[in-house]
Amino acid sequence: MQKALVVLSGGQDSTTCLYWALKRFGAEGVEAVTFDYGQRHRIELRAARKVAQRAGVRHTQLPINTFSALGGNALTDGEIAVASGVSADTGLPNTFVPGRNLIFLTFAAALAYQRGIRHLVTGVAQTDYSGYPDCRENTLQALQQALRLGMASDIELHTPLMHLSKADTVRLAVQLGALDALADSHTCYNGSRPPCGQCPACLLRTKGFAEAGVDDPLLEALPW
Amino acid sequence: MQKALVVLSGGQDSTTCLYWALKRFGAEGVEAVTFDYGQRHRIELRAARKVAQRAGVRHTQLPINTFSALGGNALTDGEIAVASGVSADTGLPNTFVPGRNLIFLTFAAALAYQRGIRHLVTGVAQTDYSGYPDCRENTLQALQQALRLGMASDIELHTPLMHLSKADTVRLAVQLGALDALADSHTCYNGSRPPCGQCPACLLRTKGFAEAGVDDPLLEALPW
């Protein structure tokens, strides 16, 4: 049986990817991995657990204490506030953690290697996003090559959302029956539930649901 | 000024690479990074500190708690003994930590990114070694591409030992004036100082010095 490991952050995109994987590989063929990398908002980890639990898949949470030690970005450094827009120095948002997706996917590939899993699924997309270079297709292709060579494996990276707009991702979630699960997902950069509605992540999510003409179930969800 | 970051494990090869970098980039242009990834033998971290201190370079130690959480290999899992030879299942030694070098180099690249350093130096080699696929040149080339794309940088990976035998590496250390520093380096998989002389790592080191016709300064070093 072909098996897949989904990198599950607990956000909208990775939750949708989990349901994409369930449809393609079946309930018995899917696992999820979530990284506790010192993210400011522990609510993300809770969202991932809730989503995995609802989907009924084996869920592994792995710690990464290195990004906090590196410091210098708004996602893991409590002393830096999330800013809108991009830095004049780097042209990147100050939530950019250099190499974050490369690290996540490499550790996920290591877990997949140990479990005999060949397919790795990630919710990154190069459209509609905040300009993270490690979410682009050519980056992921290069990484797949490095992982294959470096682990002597035939691992395959799947990025079902790569070329979808946020509205397309919402439509895909509807098709996959993932809408209920999105009530448990977490997006807000300010860590609020209900979401703040003002941060860049909330605005992007709101726009996507609006363009797809779908009500966001998170906004109607009861508190956990 | 061009600057370089050396991935310093405290072993023979990375110590030699540090001196290679010092020659090429100058004392002011070199930093070192060491990873505390839960390795069984803390003596490696001490060796790295000693080597960096002797060379007078800025030294950063970063923690990685993820490999221990992944488990399943002899280097970070205290319940698994180091075996000789390779696994019949995987064709790899049981000290193989899937993706270890990919992770080290990606975190090193993240640190380099933060410090404005473009050159990354690692002591991996594809000759004379224990069969780790993440030490091969094609793996490193693919990783360099993933790092460049993923961090939107022009980072350059240097692997001065890639095609050297262990004896060649000893000869290079002599040329670079790194021999004294090798007295502080650590190689033994059993964590012994003086070294056990019996484990695969000790045997490889012994063979290299013997073939180069050089006395290993570690064997004559006083205890720290």
Image (tube, coloured by chain):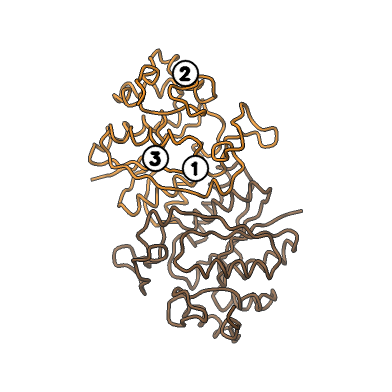
Chain colours: A brown, B orange
Q: Secondary structure at mark 2?
A: helix
Around disc 1, counting alpha carbons within 10 Å, would you say few (fewer than 14), some (14 to 19), or many (20 or more)? some
Image disc number at residue B38: 1
Determine which quarter of the picture holds residue B98: top right
Chain bearing tag 3 is B
Q: Residue at x 50, y 70 (%)?
A: A127
Image disc number at residue B7: 3
**Do the residues at pointers 3 and 1 share their chain?**
yes
**Do the residues at pointers 1 and 2 share their chain?**
yes
In this rendering, the answer to whether A207 lies above or below A119 is below
Around disc 2, counting alpha carbons within 10 Å, would you say few (fewer than 14), some (14 to 19), or many (20 or more)? some
x, y percent for residue A72: 35, 60
> What residue type is disc 2 on?
Thr
> What residue type is disc 1 on?
Gly
Sequence-wise, the earlier of marks 3 and 1 is 3
Chain bearing tag 1 is B
Tell us which disc is closer to us: 3 or 1: 1
Q: Which residue is mark 2?
A: B206
> What residue type is disc 3 on?
Val
Q: Residue at x 58, y 62 (%)?
A: A122
Number of marks in the image? 3
Q: CA distance from mark 3 to mark 2?
A: 23 Å
